[in-house]
Image (cartoon, grey):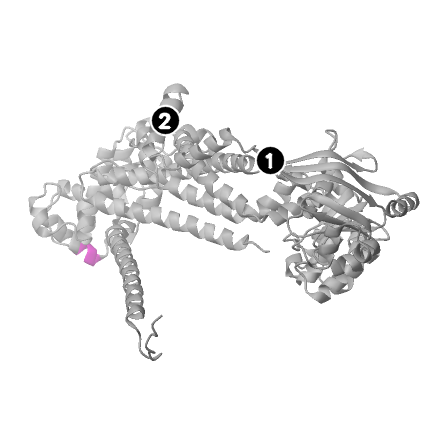
Amino acid sequence: MTATPRISLFAQDTRTKRRNAAEARFRSYGLAAIVLALLALVWLLISIFSGGLPAFKQSFLTFPVTLEESVLDKGGKRDPAIMAKATTVTYAKVLAKALEAEVAAKGLETKLKTKDLTKMISEESPATLRDRVLADPSLIGQTIQVSVLASGRIDGYYKGRVTMESAAKDKNTSPEQLALADQLKAAGVLTMQFNSGFLTMPDASDKRPEAAGLGVAIIGSLYMMVVVLVLALPIGVAASVYLEEFAPKNRITDLIEVNIANLAAVPSIVYGILGLAIFINFAGLPQSAPIVGGLVLTLMTLPRIIIPTRAALKAVPPSIRDAALGVGASNLQTITHHVLPLAMPGILTGTIIGLAQALGETAPLLLIGMVAFVRDFPGAPPEGLFDPAAALPVQIYNWTQRGDPGFVERASGAIIVLLVFLIAMNAVAIYLRRKFERRW
Amino acid sequence: MKDQRLETRVDTQTIKISAQKAQVYYGTNHAIKDVDVEILDKTVTAFIGPSGCGKSTFLRCLNRMNDTIPSCRVEGKILLEGEDIYDARVDPVQLRARIGMVFQKPNPFPKSIYDNVAYGPKIHGLTRNKAELDEIVESCLRKAALWNEVKDRLAAPGTGLSGGQQQRLCIARAIATSPEVLLMDEPCSALDPIATAQVEELIDELRSQFSVVIVTHSMQQAARVSQRTAFFHLGNLVEFGETGQIFTNPQDPRTESYISGRIG
């Protein structure tokens, strides 16, 4: 054996240097990966929020409208049948005239005719006013202050979507309209307000992005989540407890176990086809209904609840089971009194993450018809579960398909709403996990 | 000579548990071979032997805790007051209420001290009202020599106690169902010498009411607390008799080797 020359502790030998260099390299790779991921996340958030936040602000025109009986209720008897004969076209004229009067009253200069003024008001607004009058006929004859949606083009002008140049080529608007809008804004008639309708109103047709809202989609998603929670949580927990605690360990349970793990990885659209075949074609449930969406999402969520639940049950220390069995608790008592409470944080976290995945799932819902254009709000549960409804992710998908550029902003806004729901659900998961944190 | 002494003991004290040609298999592994043991009432019986000799396995057979291991199979007879505990008609839940168990590692439930002790009486419906339950909890904690330390914080979590206190809490929990036999699987192996001394003292007091079976690695402990000792080796019961006689005058050369530190 040759004597190695003694090296000072202060100098690194070549081998140590190599090892340290390898470690430094590895750290920098990891750091680079994290930075890259963070940048991507920041970019994503910036693009979503810059695109979507304008959806929460909307241009409104506020001016007095005189509801003349001679126009709106020809019979003068407030007979609903006769009042209903005044269509939205009539109301559109009423609104346009009122706006014209307001323009004159404020002393604003414009060459626009009444017909052009109609185009500055959203096509949705006459319908809103009409509904309001039909619901409260005593308004007829009065002069009321209304706050109506401006058209999508005017709104887009203030959100940077529409410019004077693009308006010149656009048959839906004109530079004169935009110039008048600027004057109206200066006069306080046109204001940007918080758009609560984005969260409460139903979807609107292609031509009126300014009126499109998430109301039906939020309710549809909510109904589906309730169905998923009510079905998937008990079934998933019961299946996990049985497999983990009672089932004999043999080939059949092994097979079931492998299949559950595989089901969690099955592409979600496959569940959509399954749902279409079983729930709609075979069982005859209605299309586009939250109940069918909920059932399909339940199928998809079940393995995603069973897997973390079984892991949580496995993680309960065997000493606790021994202790309970040792004082003479039955199997079921051991599970319900000791094992399940200790596994609860894991079960709840798994469930909420499964629900969050289900909330964001689009593909299976497309196949069961939830992509349909739905304007009517579903009824109250349980009957409402069978009414057609939309779903948040599908609504986003839908809006990205529309032609009007106003829908880009709507889709981004809907993504923000979806993200807020997901973050809220994850916050609940974290809170529950902390609350039930293991205490041994 | 040995047999005669055994006979006289049997005459004066009732046999609580009697194992006759007990065999335990883990799958194909024959873990316990032909064990004949008689556990007497109001006596501390110690099981000693090197690691892996099957003493814990045999202990866990006595209240059917081995039922939870699917590959485990018990043959022969283990009688509790003349009734075979492996009879198909026996519900292990009822059996375990009569044969309590304390484990190697203190394992209190992650609940309050009170609930730990009250759990057994509650599930077996031993009390009619809260006052009776309070009484049981207090008397068991007193018997476990824990009452004075915890009486002001019965609502505090049992897991917050020190290791020795936790083990005494587990003993209180085990005796709360008024078992006839108390099985202890190395109850002091996770405890420091002071806590060990407390638990040993406790075992000696418990002897007046229960029959105690204790598995231990410490021969000093066996000598201190037990009246009768069984020496296991490689799944066989090598020798069983009066503790004093086993330690001072072992009949089998293997026992002698073990207690003098040559095997094990």
- Magenta stretch encompasses residue A186: yes
Q: Which span of residues is magenta-colored?
A: A183-187
Tell which subunit mark 2 falls on: A
Please identify the quadrant where the C terminus of chain A is shown.
bottom right
- B28 versus B179 height, above or below: above
Of A418 and A238, the residue lying toward us = A238
Of A252 and B8, the residue lying toward us = B8
Q: Is residue A150 left or right of residue B123?
A: left
Of A276 and B163, the residue lying toward us = B163
Q: Is residue B106 left or right of residue A233?
A: right
Label 1: few (<14), some or many (≥20) within 10 Å?
Answer: few
The residue to which callout 1 is attached is B28
Q: Amino acid at mark 1?
A: Thr
Percent coordinates x, y for residue B259 in the rendering: 73, 57
Tell which subunit mark 1 falls on: B
Number of the label disc, if any, that sits on residue A274: 2
**Of helix, strand and loop, which one carries label 1?**
loop
Quarter assignment of residue A270: top left
